[in-house]
């Protein structure tokens, strides 16, 4: 190899190296990339016109009356907040081909609002799409005839249903929360308006996805609400509508679909709320009533529908859908304050989790229906022991799956409603799944509203129709 | 005298000649028959039964074509047009927005467009889709399941033995007539994978 050839080779290599280096330095491999930025969907800012809402402005009386009955199902999850009917019932253990008989049915606006029952009257916060009104409708439990209706104009667009809350009822009052967070209190018998509160304008509440599903809580003479926005929780005098206290929302949490659950933890009565952003406990009595006793953002999910469930030993079970799974926490006293200890957290396929309904505790075991992302046991009713909520004791099996519908226990029977209006009656058992009867009652869809049972009758609904079933012996 | 006509015995050469002619004739007839059958009969192509698909993600990894010939398609009739779309947004997304950190799709192959409050339309950009099925899983878990995977026949090379079908854990790959090559949700019945998709 002569010298000139070597020089040419070396020169060529150097030239190639220089070209490669310049290319490497100047070429931007990300030049074709496009950044995904917020706002590319051209989302609009909602209604620019401020809507004037006069809560409870309209009233209709329909010349019907209701014979007084004894039973009550006065609020979401019942008298004891456990979704178990405490009153003595004598319900059928099986159904013939004609049973359970449909005693009456009424057409409702599209939604998932559930009924409350009080001494022969049924209360339901409906949405009248034609009149564009939130309407508290009072029906006779005996025959389903409407007695009166208290309503107010408000624009609610269809968004996977419109109505979705259960009223709270006492001997004197009925309190409702509308889909867009308006609170209304009326006289239970006459429907006379007592007061109204717009959480949207008063507390800067952000309406949750698909509208709120928070059900109001009445505790003595106080109505307890969780607006989010400016206050995480407030108490309102049920007689006057005067705000008694406000727990500030320093953590900027938002209103969820979950409802406030009263609990007694370490000897202190508290209101526990699972917000979108975290979970907190607010003092329910004593000199520090209305103060936040503890809070934690360890439980931070954007969509939370089930309410917190407390075990006898004070542990609190939190669950949510959309991939959130579940968490078990314990509130531990530390001097004058409380600390939150996270005991366990897992994804929906690794233990009991619920997307929409709140689990039920029965004879020391917890029952719930797994969500669609619950792995192999998805959509099955499962039973777990509180000692290990990730260890499934039994499931309803691969051939018996349910949906997002409600379940409730009464007289040693558990009633489970599937999305398509099929009602299943089982014997709740801590060892195995025991199905007693099953029947398709309605032809609609999205039968997600909470059930209500009183006086041997069951109220259930799909997206547009509510029926009353005779389930008594 | 014997009137019976005596046939001329066939010699070996003639026998072989006749045999060869007959064999050739039969072969040509058979070939023509097969050609005619192939010309008239429907061919088959690979497709995914969306009701069997478990969104395992293998379609993205095992296809011999890069990126995969399997793409997400959208059955608009089934879509809820949700703001909180389980196929578009990551679980527990910070915000319901188009920001990259909120999107579930690793290649931003889903375009979200505001329709009217509170509805949004979702469109698949097929050139970006890699068939990973993350959106399909999210849509099936939290929505109506309108997002689903299909083999796109303008991209598929129709291997005799599909390399994705070999590893599909749900046996969701099947041969369908080339004249009806897609199994679009809403156009055919759940679980009846042999039915004709219109």
Image (cartoon, coloured by chain):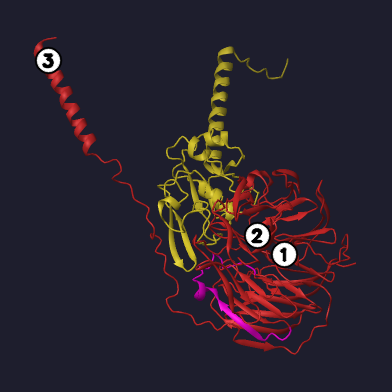
Residue highlighted by disc 1: A77
Q: Which residue is drawn at 55% across and 44% down?
A: B47
Residue B16 seen: yes
Which element type, helix, strand or loop, lies under badge 3?
helix
Chain A tint in image: red
Spot the residue most to the left. Answer: A4
Query: Where's residue A111, x and y in %?
Result: 63, 70
**Which range is magenta?**
A189-215
Report if residue A197 lies within the magenta region. Answer: yes
Which element type, helix, strand or loop, lies under badge 2?
loop
Which element type, helix, strand or loop, lies under badge 1?
loop
Which mark is on residue A50?
none
Report if residue A297 lies within the magenta region. Answer: no
Q: Assess disc 1: are there few (<14), some (14-19) or many (≥20) residues with their C-alpha within 10 Å of its C-alpha.
A: many
Residue B168, compared with residue B26, is above or below; it is below
Q: Which residue is drawn at 53% across and 77% down?
A: A155
- Upstream in the sequence, badge 1 or badge 2? 1
Image mark 1: chain = A
């Amino acid at each position: 190899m002569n010298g000139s050839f070597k020089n040419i080779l070396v020169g060529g290599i150097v030239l190639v190296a220089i070209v490669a280096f310049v290319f490497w330095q100047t070429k931007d491999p990300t030049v074709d990339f496009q950044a995904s930025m917020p706002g590319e969907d051209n989302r609009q800012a909602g209604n620019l016109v401020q809507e004037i809402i006069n809560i409870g402005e309209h009233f209709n009386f329909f010349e019907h009356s209701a014979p007084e009955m004894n039973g009550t199902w006065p609020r979401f999850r019942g008298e004891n907040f456990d979704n178990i009917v405490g009153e003595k019932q004598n319900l059928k253990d099986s159904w013939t081909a004609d049973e359970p008989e449909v005693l009456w049915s009424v057409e409702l606006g599209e939604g998932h609002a559930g009924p409350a029952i009080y001494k022969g009257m049924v209360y339901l916060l409906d949405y009248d799409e034609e009149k564009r009104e939130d309407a508290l409708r009072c029906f006779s439990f005996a025959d389903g005839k409407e007695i009166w209706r208290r309503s107010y104009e408000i624009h609610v667009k269809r968004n996977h249903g419109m109505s979705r809350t259960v009223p709270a009822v006492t001997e004197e009052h009925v309190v409702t929360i509308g889909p867009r967070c308006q609170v209304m209190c009326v006289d239970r018998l006459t429907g006379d308006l007592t007061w109204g509160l717009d959480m949207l304008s008063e507390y800067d509440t952000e309406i949750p996805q698909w509208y709120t599903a928070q059900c109001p809580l009445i505790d003595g003479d106080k109505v307890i609400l969780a607006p989010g926005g400016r206050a995480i929780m407030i108490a309102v005098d049920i007689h006057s509508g005067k705000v008694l206290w406000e727990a500030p929302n320093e953590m900027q949490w938002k209103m969820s679909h979950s409802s406030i659950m009263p609990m007694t933890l370490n000897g202190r009565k508290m209101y526990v709320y699972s917000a979108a952003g975290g979970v907190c406990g607010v003092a329910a009595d004593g000199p520090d009533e209305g103060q936040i006793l503890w809070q934690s953002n360890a439980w931070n999910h954007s969509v939370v529908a089930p309410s917190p469930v407390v075990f006898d030993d004070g542990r609190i079970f939190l669950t949510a859908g959309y991939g959130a799974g579940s968490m078990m926490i314990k509130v531990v006293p530390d001097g004058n304050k409380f600390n939150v200890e996270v005991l366990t957290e897992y994804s929906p396929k690794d233990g009991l989790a619920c997307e929409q309904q709140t689990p039920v505790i029965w004879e020391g075991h917890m029952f719930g229906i797994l969500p669609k992302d619950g792995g192999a046991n998805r959509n099955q009713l499962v039973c777990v022991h509180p000692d290990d909520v990730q260890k499934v004791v039994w499931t309803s099996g691969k051939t018996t799956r349910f949906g997002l519908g409600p379940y409730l226990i009464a007289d040693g029977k558990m009633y489970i409603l599937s999305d398509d209006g099929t009602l299943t009656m089982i014997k709740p058992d801590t060892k195995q799944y025991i199905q007693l009867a099953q029947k398709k009652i309605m032809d609609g869809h999205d039968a997600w509203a909470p059930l209500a049972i009183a006086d041997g009758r069951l109220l259930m609904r799909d997206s547009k129709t509510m029926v009353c079933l005779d389930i008594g012996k | 005298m014997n009137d019976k006509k005596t046939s001329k015995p066939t010699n070996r050469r003639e026998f072989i000649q006749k045999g060869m002619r007959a064999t050739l004739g039969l072969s040509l007839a058979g070939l023509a028959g097969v050609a005619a059958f192939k010309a008239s009969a429907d061919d088959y192509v690979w497709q995914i039964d969306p009701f069997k698909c478990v969104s395992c993600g293998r379609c993205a990894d095992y296809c011999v074509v890069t990126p995969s010939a399997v793409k997400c398609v959208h059955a608009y009739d089934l879509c809820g047009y949700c703001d909180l779309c389980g196929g578009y947004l990551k679980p527990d997304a910070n915000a319901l927005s188009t920001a990259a950190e909120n999107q579930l799709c690793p290649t931003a192959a889903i375009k979200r467009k505001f329709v009217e409050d509170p509805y949004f339309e979702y469109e698949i950009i097929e050139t970006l889709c890699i068939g990973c099925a993350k959106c399909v899983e999210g849509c099936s878990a939290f929505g109506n399941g309108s997002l689903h995977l299909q083999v796109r026949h303008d991209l598929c090379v129709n291997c005799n033995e599909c390399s994705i079908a070999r590893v599909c854990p749900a046996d969701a790959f099947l041969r369908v007539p080339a004249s009806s090559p897609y199994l679009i949700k809403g156009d055919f019945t759940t679980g009846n994978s042999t039915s004709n998709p219109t």
